[in-house]
Image: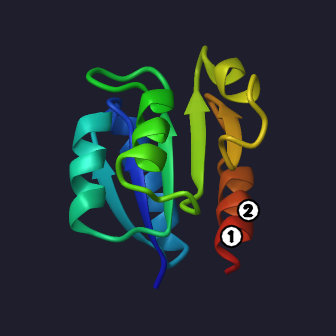
Amino acid sequence: MNSILIVDDEYLIADILGFALEDEGYLVEKASNGRKALEALREKRVDLVITDYMMPVLNGEELLNAIRDELQLADLPVILMSGAQASQGRACPGRFAAVFDKPFDMDRMITTVRELLGT
């Protein structure tokens, strides 16, 4: 079973996305900010990270940098979702596996997750 870490300080969004992904058969972990996400990634292996951009402690871009540099997880796919800063993720193509504007289409998100995980 593939596991996914959802990182978002908006609990409602994390819960809704988490429930949808669990319904698709994925194991879901959640973190409310970038630092908690790094702690979770040090403890557990996940197959995919979906992160918000605007969060306290570490934003989505800083989290991506820490995943690549500190944790040496170059192949871990990271999806960015953001209400206002999605353009930041699109500014450097290839850094994020996918970029979604909030609010996002849940069916499109699930399709992208399936494609990235090969499920």
Q: Does residue 108 appear to the left or right of 14 in the view shown?
A: right
Q: Is disc 2 in contact with disc 1, using a CB cutoff of under 8 Å?
A: yes
Question: How many residues crowd around disc 2 within 10 Å: few (fewer than 14), some, or many (20 or more)?
Answer: few
Kind of residue at badge 1:
Arg
Q: Residue furthest bottom?
A: 1
Instruction: From the viewer's side, name the closer residue of 64 and 50.
Output: 64
Residue drawn at the location 58% of the way across and 20% of the way down: 83
- Dot 1, how many residues are within 10 Å of its Cα: few (below 14), some (14-19), or many (20+)? few
- Position of residue 56 relative to residue 110, above or below, is above
Q: Where is residue 106 in the image (x, y as percent from the top left)?
A: 65, 49
Q: Dividing the image into 4 quarters, which one contains the C terminus?
A: bottom right
Considering the numbered disc 1 on the image, is that residue within a helix, a strand or a loop?
helix
Q: Mark 1 points at which residue?
A: 114
How many numbered dots are placed on residues in this image? 2
Q: Where is residue 26 in the image (x, y as percent from the top left)?
A: 47, 74
Horizontal and vertical percent for residue 113?
65, 62
Residue 14 visible, this angle? yes
Q: Is residue 109 left or right of residue 11?
A: right
**119 versus 50 height, above or below:** below
Q: Which amino acid does label 2 sit on?
A: Thr
Residue 105 seen: no
Q: Where, by quadrant of the figure, is residue 118 drawn?
A: bottom right
Q: Residue at x 40, y 40 (%)?
A: 66
Residue 9 picture location, percent across and down: 32, 30
Q: Which residue is drawn at 60% across and 46% down?
A: 79
Name the residue: 29% across, 47% down: 38
Front one among 110 and 69: 69
> What residue sits right under mark 2 in the picture?
111
Q: Element under label 2?
A: helix
**Distance between the Cα atoms at labels 2 and 1?**
5 Å
Q: Which residue lies furthest to the top in this view?
A: 84
